[in-house]
Each structure stands twice: as structure tokens, then as C-alpha cells.
Image (cartoon, rainbow, N blue to C red):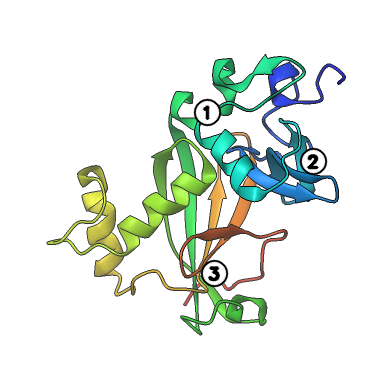
């Protein structure tokens, strides 16, 4: 293993091509087997942070108990791996509503997305920022599902007559480095898109 081949040995956490954070660690798969690594929208994998596992569940277990490692470096001792050791930072969110809510791939059709709301959130990762946004956009002023610090954003969102976030809506997540990623809202989680879809700047 060469220096800089993994995050533990100096590979940058921000993808140089997309300028976005590649964490958190996740279980990935290749022809050689299952492994734990990072990925970015610029390619199928960014780094491989572990050896190979015969099955996905074995890799998931190693990730859960932080027993993975590569090159003699134990992952539990690598602070950069774990988002619970990363300080929260500000992300700039733009909500794109689809005209075809509940249709997962509706955003791919031209003219179906409109940029309807923007606000900052505090989170450790872009994916975590999406989850905060989901909670804000699905709250009501008298029934908050999000942190109370976002009460003003909830009130403004609902005062604008905007509906709750739905399957097929897209979030643009930007940070202070100038990087921006696009995430589509799915049935159970958000999925990182390889490109930012086109959208209108008004409903």
C-alpha cells in the first residue's frame, strides 16, 4: 500500500475532482469481494480502507465494530473515519421540488424541478445535512420534527405554501469550499446523483 492510498495514510477527504467530502465509510463491492471504503459521484470508488470480505454481512459487521483496517492501521484509531468525531459545519441547502412527487425518477425529465427554498443547516456530512432538511421540510410550526433552532425556517417554508419533501425531490448541498452535490429523496434515504439535474428558479 502506498502513502496517500487511503484516508488513514493521507488521501484527502475532499475529492479533488468534485470538491465534495467522500465520507462516511460504507460497504462496497468489486470482483475481488466486499470491502469498506469511500466513494464519490466522480467514480464507483474513491478509496479502499479495508481488506476484502467474503460476504456483505461480514463487511457490515467489521464496519459496525470498527475492526476494519489496512496496512496494519486499525480503523478505530483513525479519527477522520468517524463522522461522530467530525465537528458539524454549515451547509447551504437548496430544495428542488418535483412536479411529479412520489415518482423517484421524475426529476430526470426536463422541466419537472423548481428551486423553491434555500437555508443553511449545521451537520457533519452532506448526507446528514439532507436528513436535517427532510426533518425541517416535513415539520409544521406547531409540530416540529426537527431541532427547535430551525423553527423560523419551518415557519418561512410553510408560509410560502410549500408542501412536505417527497420522493423525487432533489436537494442541492453546498459547503464553504465551493463544492456542491445533488441528492434525490428516495423511499428510505437520499441518493447521491452523479450530475446536478436542470431546474427552474421559480415554481
What distance separates the C-alpha of mark 1 from that of mark 3?
36 Å
- Number of residues whose C-alpha sits closer than 10 Å to that of mark 3, classed few (under 14), some (14–19) or many (20 or more): few
In this orientation, does residue 137 appear?
Answer: yes
| Residue of label 1 | 82
The residue located at (53%, 82%) in the rendering is 103
Q: Secondary structure at mark 3?
A: loop
Dot placed on the residue nearer the N-terminal end, 1 or 2: 2
- Number of residues whose C-alpha sits closer than 10 Å to that of mark 1, classed few (under 14), some (14–19) or many (20 or more): some
* Most foreground residue, 92 or 70: 70
Q: Are marks 1 and 3 in contact (CB under 8 Å)?
A: no
Dot placed on the residue nearer the N-terminal end, 3 or 2: 2
Dot placed on the residue nearer the N-terminal end, 1 or 3: 1
**Is residue 94 placed above or below 24 in the rendered structure?**
below
In the rendered image, residue 147, in percent from the top left (x then y), is placed at 25, 45
* Most foreground residue, 197 or 42: 42
Q: Are marks 1 and 2 in contact (CB under 8 Å)?
A: no
The residue located at (32%, 57%) in the rendering is 135
The residue located at (41%, 45%) in the rendering is 120
**Is residue 98 placed above or below 36 in the rendered structure?**
below
The residue located at (34%, 71%) in the rendering is 164
Q: Which numbered dot is residue 17?
A: 2
In the rendered image, residue 140, in percent from the top left (x then y), is placed at 20, 64
In the rendered image, residue 78, in percent from the top left (x then y), is placed at 59, 18
| Residue of label 3 | 201
State the quadrant of the N terminus: top right
**Is residue 155 placed above or below 28 in the rendered structure?**
below
Q: Secondary structure at mark 2?
A: loop
Amino acid at each position: 500500500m502506498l502513502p496517500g492510498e487511503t484516508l488513514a495514510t493521507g488521501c484527502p477527504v475532499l475529492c479533488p475532482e468534485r470538491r465534495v467530502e467522500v465520507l462516511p465509510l460504507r460497504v462496497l463491492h468489486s470482483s475481488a469481494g466486499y470491502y469498506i471504503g469511500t466513494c464519490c459521484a466522480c467514480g464507483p470508488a474513491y478509496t479502499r480502507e479495508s481488506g476484502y470480505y467474503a460476504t456483505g454481512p461480514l463487511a457490515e459487521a467489521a464496519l459496525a465494530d470498527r475492526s476494519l483496517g489496512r496496512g496494519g492501521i486499525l480503523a478505530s484509531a483513525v479519527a477522520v473515519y468517524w463522522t461522530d468525531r467530525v465537528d458539524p459545519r454549515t451547509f447551504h441547502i437548496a430544495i428542488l421540488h418535483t412536479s411529479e412527487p412520489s415518482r423517484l425518477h421524475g426529476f430526470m425529465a426536463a422541466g419537472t424541478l423548481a428551486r423553491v427554498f434555500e437555508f443553511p443547516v449545521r451537520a457533519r456530512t452532506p448526507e446528514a445535512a439532507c436528513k436535517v432538511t427532510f426533518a425541517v421540510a416535513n415539520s409544521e410550526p406547531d409540530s416540529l420534527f426537527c431541532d427547535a433552532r430551525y423553527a423560523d425556517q419551518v415557519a418561512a417554508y410553510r408560509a410560502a405554501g410549500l408542501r412536505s419533501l417527497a420522493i423525487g425531490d432533489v436537494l442541492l448541498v453546498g459547503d464553504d469550499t465551493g463544492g456542491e452535490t445533488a441528492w434525490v429523496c428516495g423511499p428510505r434515504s437520499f441518493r447521491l446523483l452523479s450530475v446536478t439535474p436542470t431546474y427552474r428558479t421559480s415554481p
